[in-house]
Image (cartoon, rainbow, N blue to C red):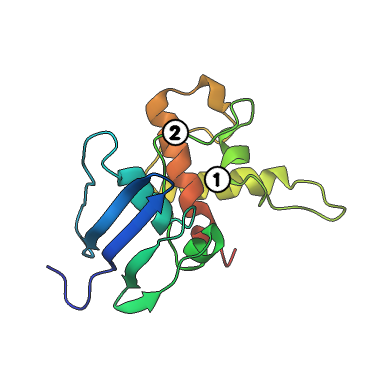
Amino acid sequence: MADGPPILEMRGIRKAFPGVVALDGVDLTLEAGAVHMLLGENGAGKSTLMKILSGAYTKDAGDIRINGRAVEIRSPRDALALGIRVIYQELNLVPHLSVAENIFLGAAPVRWGGFVDWPELYDRTSRLLADLGMSLDPRALVSRLGLAQRQMVEIAKALSDSAFAKA
């Protein structure tokens, strides 16, 4: 186990929808430097718990702590500000765009006049992919990638804003 508090603690999480209690008293602890897996049958509440963590849903009860500090996650913006990124099983990519365009969708570097700075976009993408140990062509169309490669693009996309926050 790592020194200090867990990087994430969710305690007593409850979420109900009309006619069904999806989560009731759920606890989850994530330790720094460890690999974690959330496993369960269909309908067990895995997605609901992750949607609470990502701000897609709000919890009805319970506490969330990050590095020992109590936090409230009321929206996806709150989760992003806390450094939380969730990659769902269903991919959220635009197939007719390139790897680079998908990774920096809505955040592409621009030149004077508001035009995309293509050389900078491809350079940033190449650096990010290299830092992550991923061997993908930034110009490749996502529609031509296999499932595993598309998942790698999702991971790179999730990490892109923190990797270039100061770029």
Q: Nearer the viewer, residue 112 or 12?
A: 12
Q: Nearer the viewer, residue 13 or 141?
A: 13
Q: Is residue 93 above or below residue 163?
A: above
Distance of label 2 from label 1 (alpha carbons): 23 Å
The residue to which callout 1 is attached is 125
Label 1 crowd (10 A; few <14 / some 14-19 / many >=20): many
Q: Residue 2: x, y in percent?
A: 16, 70
Q: In this view, does 11 lie above or below 88?
A: below
Which kind of residue does numbered mark 1 sit on?
Thr
Taking the image as shown, residue 135 lies to the left or right of residue 78, namely left
Residue at image point 44% right, 71% down = 72
Residue at image point 49% right, 52% down = 56
Which numbered disc covers residue 90? Answer: 2
Taking the image as shown, residue 143 lies to the left or right of residue 34, namely right
**Mark 2 or mark 1: which comes first in sequence?**
2
Which kind of residue does numbered mark 2 sit on?
Glu
| Secondary-structure class at tag 2 | loop
- Of all residues, the one furthest to the front in this rendering is 19
Residue at image point 37% right, 48% down = 48
- Can residue 164 be seen by looking at this rendering? no
- The answer to whether the residue labelled 2 contacts the one labelled 1, judged by CB atoms less than 8 Å apart, is no
Q: Residue 138: x, y in percent?
A: 55, 36
Q: Residue 17: x, y in percent?
A: 42, 48
Quadrant of the image occupied by residue 122: top right
Which numbered disc, 2 or 1, marks the residue closer to the eye?
2
- Of all residues, the one furthest to the top in this rendering is 144
Q: In which quarter of the image is the C terminus?
A: bottom right
Q: Residue 20: x, y in percent?
A: 35, 45
Label 2 crowd (10 A; few <14 / some 14-19 / many >=20): few
